[in-house]
Image (cartoon, rainbow, N blue to C red):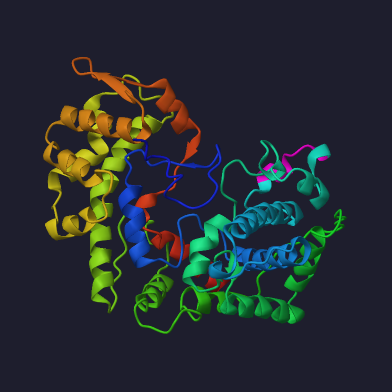
Amino acid sequence: MNYGWLSGNLEGEISESERIIDELGFSGITEPLANELLPNINTRYHSLKYYLIVCLGIKIVNDYIREKSGVEEEESAKRSEVSKSKYRKLFRVYIDYYEYWIACLHDRSKHFIGEEICVNMPPSKKPFGPRLLERNTGLIRKKGIFLTSGQSYAYDRYKTSLEFCNLILNNRLTIKGEDFVKYILESSRDSKFRWRDIYNTLKTLLDSKPEIRRQYSFTISKPMRKKIKRILIDLEYRPKDTKYNYIQEIYEQLKKRQYSPFEKGKFPKIRTHNKGANKILRAMEFFYNIANPINEIVNKLIEGKEDGNRIDNMGIEELLKPGAKWLKKLHYDRNSADIISCYDKNGAMEFIEDIYSFRADPYKVLNRMRERIGDVKNIELPFSFVRAGKEFSLNEEFEEKMRRSRKIDVNRFRLDILYDIMREIEAGI
């Protein structure tokens, strides 16, 4: 069983240079819990501008498919399976092509999803037009061209968020989504950067061999940020109910903070008027407090000493020092543990309970950790140690995977992402 790396749990493209480290498989708990609390955003969020970019892309691609290919997305009861399959294939090809051009067109003033691939592409390979794409629909996913997995960079990252906010359904804009696109195009008339320009430019890319003579900065105006806030946080376009009102409360509490909610290594003190949301928040806080010291041990194992030396020959007691003190003082909250266990599909809580019960014996802790990492990463022996000599060595495959990875903390339950969204909306950064 290989449920590490999170490619199946988190949305969006995960390239070789952008893997998410989840050595202990904790995302099997943290992602479902985050879905309960913040279903309006996901872990692979990049920036506000993609809410506009993706919605415009869906509009452009669906219009093109309908007008040029004669395949229209209708209610499933009114169309054949062949038609549905053809539509889905065409939509995937052209939404990927659209994202390819977004990455090529922006002015490099701020990082865009997929930009590094377009920038590093040989001049002879960029950019290419729709005629070449139509002759070879797999070109966009050819190694070295743009995408490297079965998912797109932006569309798949934002799909669930857009669906939750009632902007898209089945690859189409909803009535509310059409209203949002109309708002984007009309409001851009008075903006310094006109989204109507990029919309018109990208529409022409699907009609002929493109000849683009400018690049775009994709700036979002203050009124547009407020509009996105009403859609994403106030849930303006969702059916009217009070079930998710606590999202606004959490947002306002994060807004009052002077620093990132996890900057000081503690779970933020957030409470709402919703009893169910508060139970989830308490369970999250418990899991954060119990998982972080264990993660510290793994980080120490992988990163080595602070001076940059490898961990080989580091003493076991020294390795376990970051979490050992905490493990001895840990108060185990059974009510929160029971809530978390409802979301545990891969034995993470059983592993944590073992670590808690073994906390007085560093060797048992390390052995149990070795078993867990081996199961999650599908590596027979991620590391080894000699008990008498207190020496360590990392499995070469495990060390290589860690070297090619970057850390995204899945134990923050998207609260840090909501804080970043808040800063973008309020400050326009």
In the image, taking residue 72 as reference, residue 170 lies left or right, namely left
- Figure quadrant of residue 62: bottom right
* Relative to 346, residue 238 above or below: below
The one of 424 and 118 positioned closer to us in this rendering: 118
Whether residue 120 is in magenta: the answer is yes
Residue 352 x, y percent position in the rendering: 21, 43
The one of 189 and 71 positioned closer to us in this rendering: 71
The one of 37 and 69 positioned closer to us in this rendering: 69
Residue drawn at the location 59% of the way across and 79% of the way down: 175
Residue drawn at the location 60% of the way across and 59% of the way down: 84
* Relative to 43, residue 118 above or below: above
The quarter in which the C terminus is drawn is: bottom right
Residue 8 x, y percent position in the rendering: 44, 46
The residue range painted magenta reads 116-123
Q: Magenta stretch mostly in which secondary structure? A: helix
Residue 351 x, y percent position in the rendering: 21, 40
* Relative to 162, residue 119 above or below: above
Residue drawn at the location 76% of the way across and 55% of the way down: 105
Residue drawn at the location 27% of the way across and 29% of the way down: 370
In the image, taking residue 142 as reference, residue 174 lies left or right, namely left
Whether residue 229 is in magenta: the answer is no
The quarter in which the N terminus is drawn is: top left
- Figure quadrant of residue 61: bottom right
Residue 81 x, y percent position in the rendering: 57, 58
Q: How many marks?
A: 0
Q: Is residue 222 visible?
A: no
